[in-house]
């Protein structure tokens, strides 16, 4: 499944379980149905009430009830460098990010960013070009 398919799936109104919006509304059968539907699309669903969340995701506030993901969750166990920046890329910003990645490829890190236009997208492009694992948070 391509990442745009995952985005399309996450925006699909049928994939959302509004009845699971709070812990008090938690229903194990509905959650299993949600996980099965997500899996049919190559997406994994995790729910905080079920104890599925990676420990690095637990501090997110407001608390995330359901999280959809694709890829290697073990990347969260490695050192992570978060990169955020403006959506409107300046030539200086591009130069700084590219120089950073020239140095970064020497280290065993994972990058994480939002995949938005601008610095975030450049982070992911540079990561892929340098063979650095990357996480996109949509």
Image (cartoon, rainbow, N blue to C red):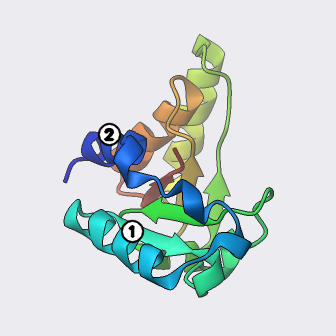
Q: Would residue 57 be found to the left or right of residue 9 on screen?
A: right
Q: Secondary structure at mark 2?
A: helix
How packed is label 1: few (under 14 Cα within 10 Å), some, or many (20 or more)? Answer: many
Q: Residue 72: x, y in percent?
A: 39, 72
Question: Which of the 4 image quadrants contains residue 66?
Answer: bottom right
- The residue beneath circle 2 is 8
Q: Residue 93: x, y in percent?
A: 64, 22
- Identify which residue is drawn at 60% across, 20% down: 87
- The residue beneath circle 1 is 34
- Identify which residue is drawn at 50% across, 84% down: 28
- Identify which residue is drawn at 43% across, 62% down: 69
Q: Secondary structure at mark 1?
A: helix
Question: Which of the 4 image quadrants contains residue 91?
Answer: top right
Question: With respect to residue 5, does 119 lie above or below?
Answer: above
Going from N to C along the chain, the mark reached first, 2 or 1, is 2
Front residue (pair 77, 63)? 63
Q: Residue 37: x, y in percent?
A: 29, 65
- How far apart marks 2 and 1 lie (CA) works out to 16 Å
How packed is label 2: few (under 14 Cα within 10 Å), some, or many (20 or more)? Answer: few
- Identify which residue is drawn at 58% across, 29% down: 119
């Amino acid at each position: 499944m391509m990442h745009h398919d995952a985005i399309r799936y996450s925006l699909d109104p049928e994939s959302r379980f509004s009845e699971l919006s709070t812990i008090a509304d938690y229903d194990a059968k509905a959650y299993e149905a949600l996980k099965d539907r997500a899996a049919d699309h190559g997406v994994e669903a995790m729910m905080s009430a079920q104890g599925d969340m990676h420990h690095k995701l637990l501090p997110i506030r407001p608390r995330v009830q359901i999280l959809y993901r694709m890829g290697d969750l073990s990347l969260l166990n490695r050192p992570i460098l978060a990169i955020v920046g403006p959506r409107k890329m300046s030539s200086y910003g591009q130069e700084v990010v590219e120089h950073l990645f020239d140095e970064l490829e020497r280290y065993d890190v994972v990058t994480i960013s939002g995949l938005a236009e601008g610095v975030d997208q450049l982070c992911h492009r540079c990561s892929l070009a340098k063979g650095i694992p990357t996480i996109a948070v949509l």
